[in-house]
Image (cartoon, rainbow, N blue to C red):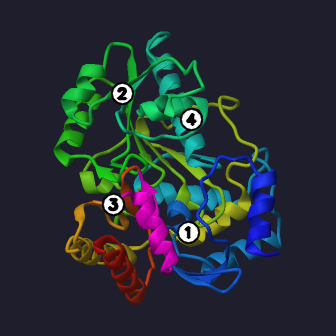
Amino acid sequence: MSFEDLQREDNQYISNTYNRFAVDLARGEGATLWSEEGRKYVDFGSGIAVNTFGVNDEVWKKAVIEQLNKIQHASNLYYTRPQARLAHLLCQKTGAKKVFFCNSGAEANECAIKAARKYSFDKYGEGRYGIVTLKNSFHGRTMATLSATGQDVMHKYFMPFLDGFSYADPTFEGVKKCCTKATCAVMLELVQGEGGVRPLDEREVKKIESFCKKNDILLIVDEVQTGNGRTGRLYAYEHFGISPDIVTTAKGLGGGLPLGAAMFFEKCENVFGAGDHGSTFGGNPVACAGAVSILERLDEKLLLEVQGKSAYLFTHLGRIRNVLSVTGLGLMIGLETTKSSREVAEKCLERGLIVLTAKNKVRLLPPLNVKKEEIDFAIQILNEVISE
C-alpha cells in the first residue's frame, strides 16, 4: 500500500479527530524511527510522552512478551501478580498508600475527582463537592475531565458540563479566591503541558498546599504528562517540595501500552470500598508487566541523566535566533518562537525530526534514554528551521 492509499483509507474510515502529520511510522529503535518507505526520523515526541525508553526497548518487550505468554487479561475480579507488583513499587517509591489502576490519564483524573468528592461527602455530607483547577489547564476529554479543564477553547459543543468546577489564576491568591465552603479539592498540573509547557511557581504552589491542608481541601496533582521520570524526578511534585493527597499519572507509566493510575496518600487511602469505582481493563497484567519494567529502571542515576540532558538542551535551545523563550522541566520543554508552532513542526519533519506542538509553542518530549548524537541532531534541525 502506498502512502497515498494509506491516507485515503484513513480519511475514509477513521473519524476526523486528528490533524495528522504526513508520515507513516513503521518501526524504530530508541529515539530513532523509520517510515514504511525507509525515511529516518529522530523522535522528540515519544508518542506524546508515552514511550519512556523509546521504541523497541528490549527490557520492556521481554516483560510484555513473557506476560503475553501467560495470560493477557483476567479482569479485576481476580488477583494478578504484575498488578500487585506495580502497585507495591508505586507506593514504595512515592509513599502512597493505595493505587487504583485504569487505562488513561483522563480516567485517572476521573477517579481522583470521584475520590475527592466521596472523601468530602463521607466527612462533611452533601454539598461540599467543588473542585478548583487552573486557567489554561488540561485534564482530559471525558465529560468530567473536560469540565475540569480550564480552557474556553475546549468548552465548545458539549454543554452542559459537570457542575462544581471553577478555574483560578495560577497563583495562591487566584486559588484562594475560588475556594469556598463547598470546595473539596484543588487540582493542579505543576507543568501545564497542553497549555503551553508552563511550570507553576514553586512558592505559589507551596502556599496553595498549606492553604489546602489548613482547610481540609484535598490537593490533587495531575502527573499524567510530567510523571515517571519526565521532569528529572520520578514525579514533578518532588521538585516543588509538596505532599499531595492524590497523584494521577498515565502516559509514560505503561511505556507504550494503555495504563493509568491514581495514587492515594494517607488522608484518602480508604476512600473507596468495593463497588465504589472500577475498570474492566484497568491494571491489565500485560500493561502492568511492562510498567514494572519501566518503573524498576527509573533510578537515581537515570533521573540525574535526564536532568543533565535537560540542562544541555535548555542552554543550546536558548541560543537559537528567533527563540523567544524556553520553558518546562526536565525533558518536557516548550519553545516559543517568532514562527507558528505548526509551521516549525512541519519543517522539522521534512528534515527528519519529529516534534510536537502545545498552543503557540514547539513541544519537545524525547525518550528519557535519548542519545547525545540524537540531541545534537535535534538542536541542529531546530536551529536551521527556527533561524531561517
Tag 1 residue: 51
Badge 1 amino acid: Asn
Q: Earlier in the sequence, mark 2 or mark 4?
A: 4
State the CA–CA distance, disc 2 to disc 1: 31 Å
State the CA–CA distance, disc 1 to disc 4: 23 Å
Residue at the outermost top position: 126
Q: Earlier in the sequence, mark 3 or mark 1?
A: 1
Tag 4 residue: 110
Q: Nearer the viewer, mark 4 or mark 3?
A: 3
State the CA–CA distance, disc 3 to disc 1: 28 Å
| Label 1 secondary element | loop
Q: Are marks 2 and 4 in contact (CB under 8 Å)?
A: no
| Label 4 secondary element | helix
Residue at 59% in and 54% down: 19
x and y, in percent, of residue 337 in the image = 29, 61
Q: Nearer the viewer, mark 2 or mark 3?
A: 3
